[in-house]
Amino acid sequence: MYNDINMDREKLIELTNKLYKQTLLFPKKEPLRYKMREVADDILAFGKEKDLEVLKKYFEVAKRQNWVSYFDLLEIEEEYDKIKSDLPRAVQGPTSNELKKKRLDTRKEKILKVLKEKEKVQVWEIKEILAEVSKRTLRRDFEQLLKQGLIERIGERNDTFYKIKVGQERTEKCPT
């Protein structure tokens, strides 16, 4: 999902860029040149459908002026129509939960990588590698990996170690 949102955002940025290139061919002092850019910027920033409707009207005026190819403007207009349903997602970007989940998965993958390199580790060893993460958070990550059956716990209290569960050595990515 995160990648889809980035792709939608990139598509919207490219589309805004196309509009800018086309409006460069409008007469320099033509207000429509700047109005279309302004609305395209607003769509990129805020993603309001109302702005799409305004832009559509501007396209109608611009297509009748013969400043640029009618079909080039029509192509950009149709691309704006296609993104209409994805507009809110593309503008807002990934949610904080999606970003948090991605960081969490990356962190678990790092833990699994260290476990594959070493036979066994303690939480404090991972804490040295992931200094920005609290020990409590790392313990929760270990608990989740235990529940997923990817690792096993050995020992108790200060002598607690974690290791890759037998049969899981080939696991490349942490399942979500």
Image: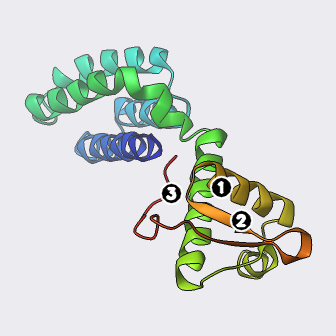
Secondary structure at numbered mark 1: helix
Residue 40: x and y in percent read 42, 34
Sooner in the amino-acid sequence: mark 1 or mark 2: 1
Query: Which residue is drawn at the image coordinates 59% and 78% (left, top)?
Result: 114
Residue 48: x and y in percent read 51, 21
Secondary structure at numbered mark 2: strand
Q: Do the residues labelled 3 and 2 touch (CB within 8 Å)?
A: no
Q: How far apart, in angstroms, are the residues tagged by discs 1 and 3?
A: 12 Å
Say above or below: 172 vs 146: below
Secondary structure at numbered mark 3: loop
The residue tagged 2 is 153
**Residue closest to the eye, 175 or 30:** 175
Sooner in the amino-acid sequence: mark 1 or mark 3: 1
Mark 3 neighbour density, 10 Å: few (under 14) some (14–19) many (20 or more): some
Mark 2 belongs to which amino acid? Arg
Mark 1 belongs to which amino acid? Leu
Q: Are marks 1 and 2 in contact (CB under 8 Å)?
A: yes
Mark 2 neighbour density, 10 Å: few (under 14) some (14–19) many (20 or more): some
Mark 1 neighbour density, 10 Å: few (under 14) some (14–19) many (20 or more): some
**Image side of residue 11 versus residue 167, left or right:** left
Q: Give the residue at the far right of this rendering.
A: 157
The residue tagged 3 is 174
Q: How far apart, in angstroms, are the residues tagged by discs 3 and 2?
A: 17 Å
Query: Which residue is drawn at the image coordinates 21% and 24% (left, top)?
Result: 78
Sooner in the amino-acid sequence: mark 3 or mark 2: 2
Q: How far apart, in angstroms, are the residues tagged by discs 1 and 2?
A: 8 Å
Residue 95: x and y in percent read 60, 38
